[in-house]
Amino acid sequence: MNPDDLLFAETHEWIRLEDTDGEKIAVVGITAFAVEQLVDVTYLEMQPVGTPASAGKEIGEIESVKAVSSIISPVDGEVIAINEELANNLQLLGDDPYQAGWMAKIRVQDEAAIEKLMDRAAYEAQCAEEG
Amino acid sequence: MNESLCTTALHSWHIEQGARLVDFAGWEMPVQYNSIVEEHLATRQGAGLFDVSHMGRIRFDGAGAARFLDRLLTRRVLDLQVGQIRYSLITNEEGNVLDDVLVYHLQTPSEIQYHMLVVNASNRLKILDWLTSHQTAEDEVQISDCTLETAMIAVQGPHALQIVDPLVDVDLNTLRYYQGVVTRQMGKPCTVSRTGYTGEDGVELIVHADKANQVVNNLFASGRDLGIRPVGLGARDTLRLEAALPLYGHELDESTSPFQAGLDFAVNLEDAQQNLRQFVGCEALAEQAQQPRHQVRVGLALEGRRAAREGHTVHAGAEQVGVVTSGSFSPTLQYPIAMAYLNVQDSPSTAEPGMELEVDIRGTRQTARVTALPFYRRDKSS
């Protein structure tokens, strides 16, 4: 996996765009930075397959000992898959946040939101400011 | 970094240890060093070291100190012996809780006796104000806020006493629970009390602020092979929750009575001679003591893995019967736990252990069973 293929949202989600049978699919997860911030993850729940995804709106929630955080959809479309394996094995998040730790796949319906996402360099700059 | 936050004497040390710092009651404090769960378990299994310097430490000198405090605390102070410590509440005229505190009666090696209150960081200024506004010229008491010139370090866990004992002049095995002594730690003045807020055995040390770093280094050297770990406020909260200890702002506030919180033991309406004591709120509390309880504090054990949090509502079928005051995933028990206030006026059985209720967690109902408190009790046989 080449991290330069990923695009990033301000809210620490990443997407990897895949072209499948002419459809644009965004694989979504959260970044290593976000996982590190959370530390003690106790629970993850994504909204089910078929849910409409709206850029900037919640598509799941992740809970740590201290608090609950929203997973925000970076794109507009429809949730076509969620990672059941991850929900049962949260360890994957820490081990492999960009591959095995994927959270949802969204069939992209409006590409406008993709323009607003950051590349890796911009995202890393944002993290440097935050951390 | 917020320039206007207070910092403790261990602030740089926290940063060196990799702490994540947050604003807590106007102090920049470590919430965790790496993992709240790891720090929590380290305290239950070995020893956790906590910087609790942000808590208020107020000293009372003079012949009238005990009498002055006895008029403001729900616990008896007049018969508090030297070396003895009591958990108490400070109530207002309505009998509602302004703060929960520890009151100490201590004696220095040169035989000066004094009293001390340790108060919540969030209430320090409020309580100082309350104390001084109730102080009259006739009271013969000098009140001094020692918070900023001292540091307070808690060492809690099954190995805590073993770690601290070689460093202090007193034999800690002779220091009983809720006893304190003014002694020396490697040559420097140190107050040691067998108190804590985790449900584990342990001590709290009070030293001069400029000695805090040295003390911490000594503790780490002594505890190196006994599992000593720095522990932040995040784990302090999960530890006290498992031990069902109330936290001001959650289980206690100015609209809560001690009886509602189940803190009957902390209200002494009578003195040692069984005469009625006079303290602020005593009339209201005497009246409340006669009434049936409308609300009770309970423990909840939840199904699933989502934690209930402060403010989540509790339901018996269609009816809301209460509200959660604190909740978290329990690292020791491995399921979510919570404390809540339940209305029992109409239905006393609502609060009975085993009763199945539901908590509304962000729009979804989760089954929760009422359990007896505390959730966790340390093994005292070891």
Image (cartoon, coloured by chain):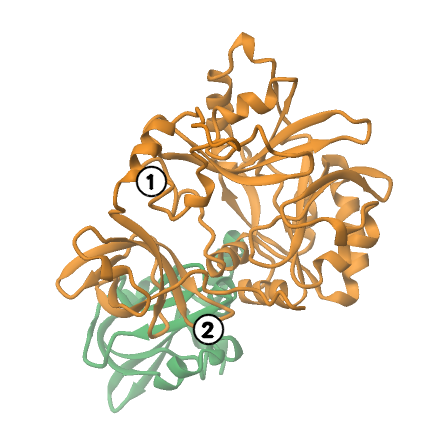
Can you name the residue that lies furthest to the front here? B273
Q: Chain of mark 2?
A: B
Instruction: Say which residue appears at 71% left-offset and 66% top-offset.
Output: B227
Nearer to us in this view, B104 or B271: B271
Q: Is residue B241 visible?
A: yes
10 Å crowding of disc 2: few (<14), some (14-19), many (20+): few
Nearer to us in this view, B381 or B8: B381
| Colour applied to chain A | green
Can you name the residue that lies furthest to the bottom here? A21
* B256 w.r.t. A53: above or below: above
Q: Chain of mark 1?
A: B
Q: Is residue B122 left or right of residue B365?
A: right
- Asked if both marks, 2 and 1, belong to the same chain, the answer given is yes
Residue B67 is situated, as x and y percent measured from the top left of the image, at 56, 22
Instruction: Say which residue appears at 33% left-offset and 39% top-offset.
Output: B289
Residue B295 is situated, as x and y percent measured from the top left of the image, at 27, 49
Can you name the residue that lies furthest to the top here? B137
Q: Is residue B285 left or right of residue B345?
A: right
Chain appearing in orange on the rendered image: B
Residue B229 is situated, as x and y percent measured from the top left of the image, at 68, 60
Can you name the residue that lies furthest to the right here? B187
Q: Which residue is mark 2?
A: B334
Kind of residue at disc 2:
Gln
10 Å crowding of disc 1: few (<14), some (14-19), many (20+): some
* B35 w.r.t. B7: above or below: below
Q: Which mark is residue A26?
A: none
Q: Which mark is residue B256?
A: 1
Instruction: Say which residue appears at 23% left-offset and 61% top-offset.
Output: B350
Kind of residue at disc 1:
Thr
* B71 w.r.t. B193: above or below: above
**Which secondary structure lies at badge 2?**
loop
* Mark pair 2, 1: CA separation: 30 Å
